[in-house]
Image: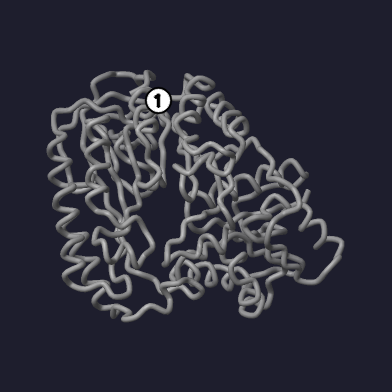
Amino acid sequence: MPSVALVTLGCPKNQVDSQSMAALLEQSGYLVTDDPATADVVIVNTCGFIAPAREESLAELKRLAAGKRRGQVLIAAGCLAELDPAMLQARVRRLDAVLGTRRWHDVADLLQALAERQVERPVWTGDSARPAPSLDRRPPGVTAYVKIADGCNAPCAFCSIPRIKGPFRSRPREAIIAEVQRLAASGYKEVILVAQDSTAYGRDLGEPDGLPELLRAIATAAPALPWLRLMYTYPQHISERLLEAMAGTPMVCHYLDLPLQHAHPDVLRRMRRPSDPEALLRLLERVRATMPDVALRTAFIVGFPGETEAEFETLLGFVQDVRFDHVGVFTYSREPGTPAYEMEPQVPEAVKEQRRSRLLELQQRLSLQKNQALVGQRLQVLVEGSGDGISVGRTYRDAPEVDGLAILRAEFPVGSLVPGRVVQGMEYDLLLDPLAKGPDTRPR
């Protein structure tokens, strides 16, 4: 039985694609292994979003190519493979094939073509001739990401995603619900819905506001699932119906991830983003009025072409006023092929880094204050690891990998939902005392 190892770089959407490839390959008779050194085939699911991610993907491919055994197959898949296959073939000479983002489900056919030597160094990019199948994935841990759509129609001036992923395409609702049902039945405690723009779900299917109905349908079909979380929700598509569905569906975490990118109207216009900060403030007021306990995450880009010190100060003031729970800060990355690439003036790298540090320092102070205000509150903790007298996990306020941790002063089994009382709020993490000797399996 030939073996395949998958190396995944980039975002959770790439994780979903890798897990789906693994499930499909197992169905096709391959043994999926975690060890690239011994595998017959190594597939690197690359990221191509910004320059550092491309450099990381290229370096990993070169490293694996340098250690290739005789007869071993190396394939570049994913975003960088879709964005620039010719560059990969030129710079990774021992690369055997390229598989783009929209053809991951053709991976078994590609391996068959390579085994039969149908073509040398094939490049399979662009749209597949068939739809992606719905597969029974088994992600590690107790949390599973579910992709509800792919592609993007947003015109953001800084972003390559539409070139990489193609136009926005919603998955059929029935396929999403069936996948969540399988995961819940298999014991997963948290499902996270992801897309390039989750709030655009259904628009291409003739449903201008399809996400609220999807949430309610999932809750009906998989009532035992404790947590359902939304990521990548764009502000221009957040409706009153969505907020009502989130507030009225117990399994839905009161957590909203809004990639705002900036707060100065002139910068937002140059970014080709919604450019009315007052409208954003009104939206955030509605969110908090509907869900007073909501945790808000956002992301900002500093150093976008033409960003002045005054424009950056406006962003600092916005963050100070809104007091987000979590903030990601990125320096602008100049991406070839995007409208922003030709914009002038480009902000010097040193200025970008200084502004990033200033914004992160502000958010660190705000995050500490927010977490300290939680002392005394009762929160459930989803346990993800335990040992040495403690358990480590997350509350509903924290998404995996990007937010903080919750530390319980007792050991509980992985996958337990344990009620605790916050005894200390740190800059990013919470310390809690458990309020029960055993896990609490009730929804939050």
Confirm whether residue 391 shows in the render.
no
| Side of 349 relative to 149 (left or right) | left
Q: Residue at x 38, y 78 (%)?
A: 343
Confirm whether residue 229 shows in the render.
yes
The residue closer to the viewer here, 331 or 419, is 331
Residue ID for mark 1 = 251
Quadrant of the image occupied by residue 182: top right
Quadrant of the image occupied by residue 72: bottom right
Q: Is residue 116 above or below residue 186?
A: below
Tell me residue 62's x, y (percent).
Answer: 58, 73
Amino acid at the residue labelled 1: Met
Q: Is residue 264 above or below residue 172?
A: below
State which quarter of the image contains the C terminus: top left
The residue closer to the viewer here, 236 or 379, is 236
Q: Residue at x 61, y 30 (%)?
A: 174
SS type, badge 1: loop
Tell me residue 341's x, y (percent).
Answer: 43, 76
Q: How many other residues sit within 10 Å of disc 1, few (<14), some (14-19) or many (≥20)?
A: many
